[in-house]
Image: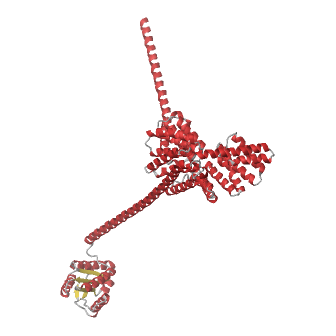
Amino acid sequence: MFFFSITNGMNMTNRQLFSLIILTFKRVIFFSLFAVNAYAQPSSEQIILSNQVLKLLKVNSESLNADTVKKLSEKILDNRKNYSNDILAKVFLLAANVASNQANINQVHDFAQSGLSVNSRDKKIKLALLLKLAEVYVAREKYQQLLILIQTAVNNSEYSRNIKHQLLLLSYRSVAFAMLGEHQAALADLQQVERGINKSELTEHIELLTILSLAYHYLGDYQTSLTMQLKILKLRFEMGLLDNLDQTYLYLGYAYFYLQRFDDAYNAFWQSKSYAENKTAPISAAYASKGLGIVLISQQQFDEAIESLEPTIAIFKHNDMLDEQIESMVALASARLAIAQNSAGYALLVEVLQLLDGEDISLEYAGFYRMVAEMYLADNNYQSAYLWREKHSKVLLTKLKDMKKSATLAHGLSYLITDPQAIVEPLHESRNLAVKLAQNSELSSSFVGKYQKQRTIIISLSALVCLLLITLLGFFLRLKTQRINLAYEEIEKPSYIMTGPMQTKFDYQLAFKKARKFQYPLSVGYLVVENWQELTFHFNNKSIKEVTKDIASLINEQLTEFDYAGLLNQGEYLLMFEHVSSAEAHMKLDKLVQALNSRAFANLGRFSITMKYSLKTPDYKDIDPYLFLAHIAESVNIKPVNQSKVS
């Protein structure tokens, strides 16, 4: 008994332990499934967002929607640990493209650097990010860094078969070589671009030509830059690539400005500003406003220049674009000093000195040093004025010496050449080759435009021909169906059916004219119920209709292939016999009357119907068919011709 109790207790303990293990296992499975479901939800969102990134990469970079890219990049970058490095690099590339469209060079630099820092395995994306960084170096005129970057990228591009990237790399490298005075190397790269440009799409020509045009702008060859930019503008309109027109007009404006064509420059800057404002690109609009201000100062319209430059400074300051802010402030100071607003102008100059912090300003704005010297001179600080005048001279000399070594030996600054024979020829060849590339792209665009127009016309005409064929086929089938239905109706129509008076007269006139024209015999018979008035007076409409049907049935039964019968009026019938003699027609008509004589009309009782007829054949004297018919009817009314009684 004691042993049983111990055993029973041990069994209960084992059962409780087993139940506890099962319960714990179920809980583990439940929480595991919950965790998997919780993780699966963001995973599906990651797939959707990643697919959106891939889809946007297929869109032309100039046509990217800034808001769409911004929202997408925020969602992905806020959870960047859940995405691969390739997706992150592609997001940064999209963001850099949008920043480039809005002329925000600082953001282009930041996004490109961030994209390169994630170490994507996609070499194509990596090259695209390097090219964005090259765009920044060109804009900031850092040509030594540009050359180092492009040399590295060219080595990496050997693993990429993308023609577009290879051509862009060669273009950027030719820019770097040209700006550093290595014109033979620049020419060699341009020749490679010429050989490869035919293999690229026309949309890529614009980017290539823009890079080369900017190079000639920075080289001081503004006429070549203007020529290329005008061709780029034409390409944009012909191909419908209007998203970045603001940038093309901006470059055009500066080319016109340095060629002292101020009215054209003003129009180009104004167009640039309009397009930038339409696509909501405040930085690009600020660049255009800055250009407008400089042109207005050259035209001595200082109040308008101040109005254009003041908001520009605020935009550049807000976006931390120091160089552009300084240049705009110098231009504004120049305008204020020109209208004797000396205190405001000097305040701007002092602020610019603080922002420069000992750095030199660009050559185009070297007049800043002269204005500072004049400021100190007005304050009777002669020593400082002298120092700033001296600094102004030194800066100009240093810059001019550097320009002598560079491609400014070109058209615009030819008086600075130190060794013309060494470098003018390759530089001239490079310039001609760049213009040739622009002209070839223009011709290609024109050819493509004409081809597309011809293709559209051919497709439209083909569609019209197909539509006409389908319409004709529909009419043919409809006509065939009508004929089948008509034949069926002819077969199935009741024997008492007879054509009405109008159709009878038409058919008679047609048959009469045909008989005269083709000279075949035609006998015309006129059959009439003589006592029709008595019949209608004594009997109701129902009885009259039955009698009319019986008469029509008897007439139709006696007709052959070339015979015709129709109703002229109530109780009057017209019969025509084609291709038969008059005697034969008389026999047929007599036979018909005999058939009517033998017909008993039970519904009429003892009433008898009196029938009479007349038959004639027209000769050459009978011209009018209706006059001939009238003669037949009169002959019936004058005397009873071939009269017959039907009882």
What colour scheme was applied to this rendering of the protein? secondary structure
Q: Can residue 489 be seen by looking at this rendering?
A: yes
Q: Position of residue 330 (x, y in %)?
A: 70, 48
Extreme-top residue of the structure:
2
| Residue located 79% across and 48% down the image | 378
Is residue 608 among the parts visible in the rendering? no
Q: Residue furthest bottom?
A: 638
Q: Is residue 507 above or below residue 276?
A: below
* Front one among 414 and 266: 414
Judging depth in this view, the residue of 338 and 533 nearest the camera is: 338
Left of 307 or right of it: where is 477?
left
Q: Quadrant of residue 568?
A: bottom left
Q: Position of residue 372 (x, y in %)?
A: 74, 46
Q: Determine which quarter of the picture holds residue 387.
A: top right
User: In the image, what residue occupies the spot 44% across and 44% down?
Assistant: 162
How many badges with numbers are in the image?
Answer: 0
State the residue at coordinates (45%, 56%).
Answer: 444
Relative height, residue 146 to residue 237 (above, below)? above
Quadrant in which the C terminus appears: bottom left
* Left or right relative to 39: residue 348: right
Instruction: Decide if residue 401 is on the left or right side of residue 595.
Output: right
Q: Quadrant of the N terminus?
A: top left
**Measured from the top left, where is residue 611 in percent x and y?**
25, 86
Q: Residue at x 77, y 43 (%)?
A: 384
